Image (spheres, rainbow, N blue to C red):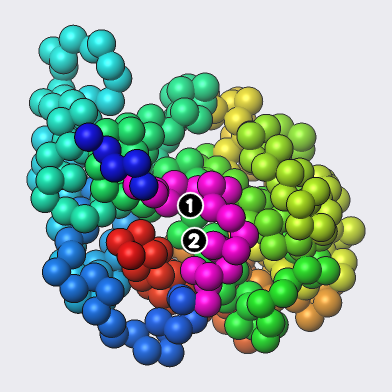
Amino acid sequence: MKPASIRHFLNTQDWSRADLDALLVQAAAFKRNKLGDQLKGKSVALVFFNSSLRTRTSFELGTFQLGGHAVVLQPGKDAWPIEFNLGTVMNGEAEEHIAEVAKVLSRYVDMIGVRAFPKFVDWSVDREDRVLRGFAQHATVPVINMETITHPCQELAHILALQEHFGTADLRGKKYVLTWTYHPKALNTAVANSALTIATRMGMDVTLLCPTPEYVLDQRYMDWAAQNVAESGGSLQVSHDIDSAYRGADVVYAKSWGALPYFGNWEPEKPIRDAHKHFIVDEAKMALTNHGVFSHCLPLRRNIKATDAVMDSPQCIAIEEAENRLHVQKAIMAALVS
């Protein structure tokens, strides 16, 4: 039976602002003193349906630095393929059902991290986040979202980097530009969904800059952003004009994502993408900002999403943000087992 008090970390929107602030304070403390015993005698299963560099490294090391042990599993590679739909006659590739997987892992470990990207076939299905929700439904231990259709760990790492850069926990009044950038492939909207969510949660004046209305994010996240603006102050606007969006910006956060109307049918979208390569973050655009800071979740294709000059500028805090993944995830795990 699932404990009544179980708490997951699936989206920051599920957590109060006070709780998020407490996680950021704890993450900053872990950054000053990286070792602890909050996970002593504890274990974490890290379930990767997709590849990773920063996520796997930071979660494994973070668990170790707090005295715990991480077990990495890759269903379909070093673990059995898993079925997530109820009522399915399992005569295909999947060898076991999430109902058993999550319950068995819960008997072994104290937390479960899940990384599972969309299948890019049908957004109406992918937006249900069935893999993550399946683990959360059947597990009797806390579940952490290591990136599915949102990326809440990246959100906190991003905000911690901004707080460090500006020297304050209060980011209200900062002009924040979340800009689409070109990529040769249509990518997941997870980081864009999360950046929009956390920037509005922190009360910043947010501009979602994208080539055409087709690149506006799923209504769920636009609604979350509007709710956050109502509760936290700040503002939200959608723009397709590069110059006005960049002008006076304090923060430029870049990400590429596919247009949802073409989800699973990317060929008709490709000409639109190809026509907007000029959305690259370059020196001329950054010169329009208010000495703005630039960041990206990484990995980043240089001179496709942002130029070398932008990436190598002192105003780029992408490496600091990446480092902060380690610290915020330790804070999340410590909070979930406390």
Q: Position of residue 211 (x, y in %)?
A: 74, 43
User: Do the numbered discs 2 and 1 sit on residues whose CB atoms are within 8 Å?
Assistant: yes
* Helix, strand or loop for disc 2: helix
Q: Is residue 6 left or right of residue 204?
A: left
The C terminus is located in which quarter? Answer: bottom left
Mark 2 Cα-neighbour bin, 10 Å: few <14, some 14–19, many ≥20: many
Magenta region, residue range: 6-25
Task: Specify the quadrant of the image occupied by residue 59.
Answer: bottom left
Task: Specify the quadrant of the image occupied by residue 313.
Answer: bottom right
Amino acid type, mark 2: Gln
The N terminus is located in which quarter? Answer: top left
The residue depicted at 63 percent of the width and 25 percent of the height is: 261
Is 92 placed above or below 273 here? above
Is 318 placed above or below 281 here? below
Amino acid type, mark 1: His
Dot 1 corresponds to which residue?
151
Residue 332 visible in the picture: yes
Q: Is residue 231 magenta?
A: no
Which residue is nearer to you in this view: 236 or 107?
107
